[in-house]
Image: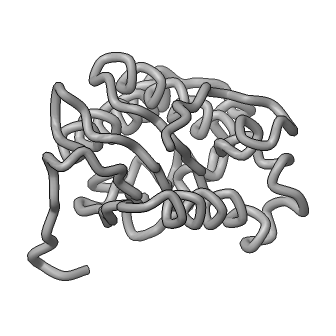
Amino acid sequence: MPKRLKRIYGSGDLHFITFSCYRRLPLLASPHSRDIFVDALRRVRAEYGFKLVGYVLMPEHVHLLISESARGTPSTVLKMLKQRVSRQLRSKLQRGVSEEQQPLPFAQALKGLPQFWQRRFYDFNVLSHRKKVEKLDYMHRNPVKRGLVEDPKDWRWSSYSFYQGRGAVLIEMDVVE
């Protein structure tokens, strides 16, 4: 990633954001860890008041399509989200959550890591409806492309179900034209 990423905030654009787990390790591989992420996303969204237009959680990275918040930049929002997810997963590990909730390989991997997330993130300003649709389509096809599921409706941790009315909706989306 370039050392000097240019972030453009304040124009009211949507932001297509991609960020990864430390060294692209599959730290979000378990349903339990993805559920914790969704819960943290819900809480940070309520606290910062940004619009959540789309998302997908992959085993080693995340894509979000969000609006700017009146209470903080997308950088601030991501900082809070990443902190909450990593702290919650690490605290559950320290409290000894059962193996079925947090599989042993995950627990062993997390113990030895200096951090949960890569420090930086990719931010693309979405300036048109066509680009918004393109980014949503890209996110929703990601689990299929990676071979995690055959149909996007079968990947619970994405906004696909909200838009297509197929599958379980874990978090409501904000419709933005």
On screen, residue 13 versus residue 95, left or right, reads left
Q: Is residue 45 above or below residue 120?
A: above
Vertical relation: 84 (above or below) 106:
above
Q: How many marks?
A: 0
On-image quarter of the N terminus: bottom left
Residue 92: horizontal and vertical position, in percent? Answer: 48, 25
Q: Residue at x 66, y 62 (%)?
A: 137
Residue for point 13% across, 69% down: 6
- The percent coordinates of residue 39 (x first, y second) are 52, 24
Q: Residue furthest bottom?
A: 2
Point 29% across, 43% down: residue: 78
Image position of 30 (left or right of 27): right
Is residue 111 rendered to the left or right of residue 5? right
Q: Nearer the viewer, residue 110 or 167?
A: 167
Note whether 11 is above or below 90 in the view shown.
Answer: below
Q: Residue at x 24, y 62 (%)?
A: 120
What kind of colouring is applied to the model shown? one colour
Q: Position of residue 157 (x, y in %)?
A: 67, 42
x and y percentages locating residue 102 in the rendered image: 63, 36
Residue 142, by quadrant, is bottom right
Q: Residue furthest left?
A: 4
Is residue 142 positioned above or below 162 on the image? below
Instruction: Using the image as rendered, state which of residue 118 and residue 89 is in the foreground.
Output: 118
